[in-house]
């Protein structure tokens, strides 16, 4: 009987220890499919910017991940294929002046996953050329919080990945 009592106590201590470990360990990504993880480690090492590459056919496009932006943008001067919605809008440009833009639909692919998103298309050449001069990377667009919310992505700056929850 005492052997069962001791075995029971050891099992309870093991469970308690496991629960304590779960509560105190570092962030751990669970139930994530490999296709749903987008790493930006390389771009952070090279430029210090969180950039993810998306594709349309064989063409690659660099998108800056910007949690400070409420909406997503694409450079209308790029060769990215978009579909017009006919909806005009304005946004506060880097010069502090309202600038014209249009809402467009864009379809992007990454790891065989299709992303369709409504973005603002504007002339972002000035800002993106400065990034190219400084970091050597040509940016096509900015993914803002509207993208992260729609696709339920979280940014993990410890692991340098974006992953779906």
Image (tube, helix red, strand yellow):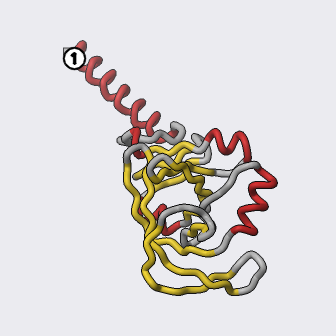
45, 110: nearer the viewer: 110
Give the number of callouts: 1
Q: Look at 18% across and 15% down and name the residue there.
A: 1
Would you identify the image quadrant in which residue 83 lies? bottom left
Mark 1 — residue?
4
Q: Residue 99, position in %: x, y?
A: 67, 84
Residue extending farthest left: 1
Would you identify the image quadrant in which residue 78 lies? bottom right
Q: Say left or right for 161 vs 50.
A: left
30, 123: nearer the viewer: 123
Tell me the crowding category of disc 1: few under 14, some 14 to 19, or many 20 or more residues within 10 angstroms, Cα based: few
Q: Look at 46% across and 34% down and name the residue there.
A: 21
Query: Circle 1 — which element?
Result: helix
Q: Residue 141, position in %: x, y?
A: 59, 62
Q: Look at 60% across and 85% down and name the residue there.
A: 90
Q: Is residue 1 above or below residue 85?
A: above
Q: Say left or right for 160 vs 132.
A: left
């Amino acid at each position: 009987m005492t052997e069962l009592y001791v075995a029971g106590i050891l099992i309870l201590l093991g469970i308690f220890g496991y629960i304590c470990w779960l509560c105190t360990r570092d962030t751990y990504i669970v139930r994530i499919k490999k296709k749903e993880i987008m790493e930006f480690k390389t771009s952070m090492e090279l430029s210090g910017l969180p950039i993810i590459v998306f594709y349309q056919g064989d063409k690659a496009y660099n998108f800056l991940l910007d949690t400070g932006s409420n909406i997503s943008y694409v450079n209308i001067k790029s060769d990215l294929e978009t579909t017009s919605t006919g909806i005009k809008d304005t946004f506060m440009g880097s010069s502090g002046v309202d600038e014209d833009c249009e809402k467009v639909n864009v379809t992007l692919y990454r790891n065989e996953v299709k992303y369709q998103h409504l973005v603002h298309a504007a002339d972002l050449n000035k800002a993106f050329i400065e990034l190219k001069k400084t970091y050597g990377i040509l940016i096509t667009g900015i993914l803002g919080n509207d993208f992260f919310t729609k696709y339920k992505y979280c940014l993990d700056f410890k692991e340098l990945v974006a992953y779906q929850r």
